[in-house]
Amino acid sequence: MTTRAATLSALVLIAALAAADCRTATRRTAPNAPPAPSSPEALRAAIEKVRPLHKLMGPPQPGDWLDTFKEPGQTFEEYLKGNPTRPEGARRVLYVQPLGHFTPAQTRVVEFTADFLSRFFNLPVRVREPAPLDHVPPAALRKSPIGGGRQVKAGYVMMEVLKPTLPTDAAALIGFTSVDLFPDETMNYVFGQANLTERVGVWSLYWLGRPDASGDDFKFTLLHTLKIAAHETGHMFSIQHCTKYECVMNGTNSLQETDRHPLDACPECMAKLCWAAGADPRERYARLADFCAQHGLTAEQRLFQESARALEKN
């Protein structure tokens, strides 16, 4: 190669490198891409867009949860700072474990609830084969103070039945049973209970209705079960009781109080679960509206649709 040719080649190479540097600089100085829908920045904006659709909590009625238990609540910002348990790494599957005997209608309630949970938390759900709940030690049993029937301690089910079988890819393991549950000797019964750190929880269909009685009874039982399932699974991802809005994460002392609470999460709790599971809030609302349409939950469908539309606006 002549000296002139070598010089020309060097100049071409320098020009190419300069062009590449220019393109890199252009990319670096271009405006940032929009934040991911599940980023804290995007979720703060989503909170403001759906806030007008939600009601603030009023004073508790006598006997309500907040009348009995004084709780401070939990904001989205507090949740972010609290190092919450959430789906991460390989742990991204929700497992549903039926425990004991179920009627055909109760089995359908569990199956529909599994579908709902997948949409609510943006996670795959696997329903396991039913397991017995017959050989419970006497220390975890008692007679109900209300009707005298058999009750099983929820903590025993979580820690002795569910926790030893927690899969390595489980974001959470959820036990469903038709057996009456109690949390401790101070309470008559409990709809459900979850451990905020161990990724296990259990809830009972015992008090939630008679799904075999009629079509309306099935729908009421399903709605009760969806609320309890979403609530307790939220606890497994470190979401505490909501005290600011009418919200599925409100504490409840009775089925009547549960009926007053919505199926939807409030703006703050929606942001918590979308951040935890990496969910796009608008797509999540659309999937939930579709579920409600399939099961005749008209009022709930309307709110999810309105929320999805609110997030379409700039």
Image: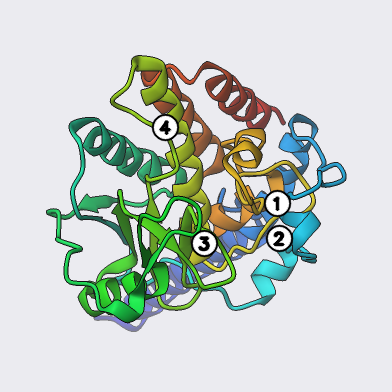
**Residue 132 locus on image (x, y percent):** 15, 61
Badge 1 amino acid: Glu
Q: Which residue is mark 4?
A: 221
Name the residue located 50 percent from the left edge and 59 percent from the top edge: 145
Residue 268's mark? 1
Q: Residues within 10 Å of mark 2 (few under 14, many from 20)?
A: many
Disc number lying in front (1 or 4): 4
Nearer the N terminus, badge 4 or badge 2?
2
Alpha carbon separation for disc pair 3 and 4: 28 Å
Badge 4 amino acid: Thr
Q: Which residue is mark 3?
A: 276
Q: Badges 2 and 1: C-beta atoms under 8 Å apart? A: yes
Instruction: Give the vertical position of 215 relative to 260 (above or below).
Output: above
Disc number lying in front (4 or 2): 4
Q: Badges 1 and 4: C-beta atoms under 8 Å apart? A: no
Nearer the N terminus, badge 1 or badge 3?
1
Q: Which residue is mark 2?
A: 76
Q: Residues within 10 Å of mark 4 (few under 14, many from 20)?
A: many
**Residue 129 locus on image (x, y percent):** 12, 54
